[in-house]
Image (spheres, grey):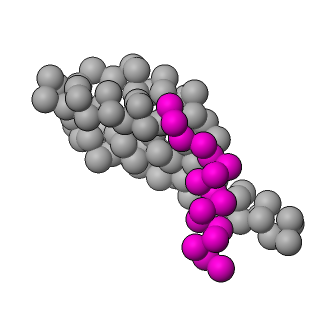
Amino acid sequence: MAEIMNGNQSLSNDYLQKASEIYEQRIEKDRNDVDAIGNKASALCYMGKKKEALAFLNSLSVSKENQKLVEQMKADIAEFETSEALKMLLVKEE
């Protein structure tokens, strides 16, 4: 069972990395694409890169109307626990 979980996590990380790159391309085109911003931060968290997700959010320069959304994303990311989130995903799949 542990080998399957490790394999699934490795595969998931590959997909999440690719997704993160696609979100980054969208953000490069529109720095106020809050959907792409939130999804990239979430992808980083699910890959166990919570600090990188927070650094990414802190590095953004978004419009005034999107600043509150980004601040809420930071608060959500600060509370994110990768292991707990992955456990919930695994339970849903069973």
Residue 50: x %, y % from top left: 57, 34
Classify residue 61 by image quadrant.
top left
Looking at the picture, tell me which residue is in the foreground, 33 or 81.
81
Looking at the picture, tell me which residue is in the foreground, 60 or 82.
82
Q: Residue at x 39, y 20 (%)?
A: 59
Q: Residue at x 64, y 71 (%)?
A: 91
Residue 22: x %, y % from top left: 41, 49
Residue 74: x %, y % from top left: 40, 30
Residue 32: x %, y % from top left: 21, 34
Q: Is residue 7 left or right of residue 12?
A: right
Q: Residue at x 43, y 38 (%)?
A: 76
Classify residue 7 by image quadrant.
bottom right
Q: Residue at x 64, y 52 (%)?
A: 84
Whether residue 81 appears in magenta in the rendering, the answer is yes
Seen in the picture, residue 7 relative to 42 is either above or below; the reply is below
Q: Is residue 30 left or right of residue 86?
A: left
**Dominant SS in magenta:** helix
Look at the image and tell me in which quarter the N terminus lies: bottom right
Look at the image and tell me in which quarter the C terminus lies: bottom right
Seen in the picture, residue 44 relative to 19 is either above or below; the reply is above
Q: What segment carries the magenta color?
A: 78-94
Residue 4 seen in the figure: yes
